[in-house]
Image (tube, grey):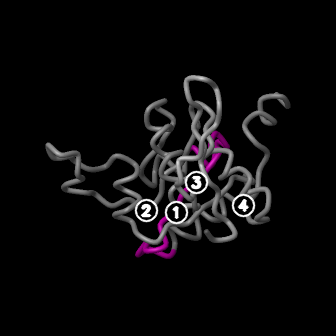
């Protein structure tokens, strides 16, 4: 296990925690958080809608693809995240981000087919708390790039 990895634990019927053996890294935690956001209708896809949410400061997390072809998109999203103090993560591939955001068809076995790429997605609602969300929030606390208060702190300040 690397230094930044966390072992995920699950609760059994008796309430005892038992480790699943999975080492969690940033990308696997992000994938799980995006999945929960999709379920709770809290994920925004596409540059136009993401920029609107970032400008209104409705976003908790922004995920940007490093393989974005247009440098002006990258500068715009980074500037809006910095201005609004919104957490920003970069992933290596646009296709991978599109798959995680649900922009694909699934075949009978559940494998992704016809994956559409996307340059940016924004999370407005994390959904229910999870170990992956805690891992990401702890990552943002230790990393000083574009950190913002947790969603619980934002609700208290309103």
Q: Which of marks 3 and 2 is nearer the N terminus?
A: 3
Q: Mark 4 points at which residue?
A: 82
Query: Dot 2: what SS?
Result: loop
Label of residue 124 in the image: none
Count of numbered tags: 4
> Would you say the residues marked 1 and 3 are in contact, meaning their CB atoms lie under 8 Å apart?
yes
> Would you say the residues marked 3 and 2 are in contact, meaning their CB atoms lie under 8 Å apart?
no
Query: Dot 3: what SS?
Result: strand
> Would you say the residues marked 2 and 4 are in contact, meaning their CB atoms lie under 8 Å apart?
no
Query: Is 110 covered by the magenta stretch?
Result: no
Q: Name the residue under label 1.
A: 64
- Give the residue at the far right of this rendering: 157
Q: Mark 2 points at which residue?
A: 119
Query: Dot 4: what SS?
Result: helix
Which residues lie in the magenta part?
Answer: 53-71
Crowding near pointer 3: few (<14 within 10 Å), some, many (20+)?
A: many
Q: Which of 34 and 42 is in front in this view?
A: 34
> Which part of the image, by quadrant, shows the C terminus?
top right
Crowding near pointer 1: few (<14 within 10 Å), some, many (20+)?
A: many
Question: Residue at horizontal 65%, vertical 31%?
Answer: 16
Query: Is 56 covered by the magenta stretch?
Result: yes
> Would you say the residues marked 1 and 2 are in contact, meaning their CB atoms lie under 8 Å apart?
yes
Q: Which of 114 and 157 is in front in this view?
A: 114
Q: Which of marks 1 and 2 is nearer the N terminus?
A: 1
């Amino acid at each position: 296990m690397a230094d930044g990895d966390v072992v995920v634990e699950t609760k059994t019927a008796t309430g005892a925690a038992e480790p699943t053996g999975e080492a969690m890294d940033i990308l696997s935690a992000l994938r799980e958080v995006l999945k929960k956001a999709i379920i709770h209708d809290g994920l925004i896809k596409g540059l136009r809608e993401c920029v609107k949410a970032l400008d209104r400061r409705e976003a908790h997390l922004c995920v940007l693809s490093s393989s974005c072809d247009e440098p002006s998109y990258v500068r715009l999203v980074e500037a809006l995240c910095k201005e609004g103090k919104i957490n920003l993560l970069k992933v290596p591939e646009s296709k991978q981000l599109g798959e995680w955001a649900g922009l694909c068809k699934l075949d009978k076995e559940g494998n992704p087919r016809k994956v559409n790429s996307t340059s940016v997605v924004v999370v407005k609602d994390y959904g229910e708390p999870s170990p992956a969300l805690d891992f990401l929030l702890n990552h943002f606390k230790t990393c000083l790039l574009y950190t913002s208060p947790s969603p619980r702190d934002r609700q208290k300040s309103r």
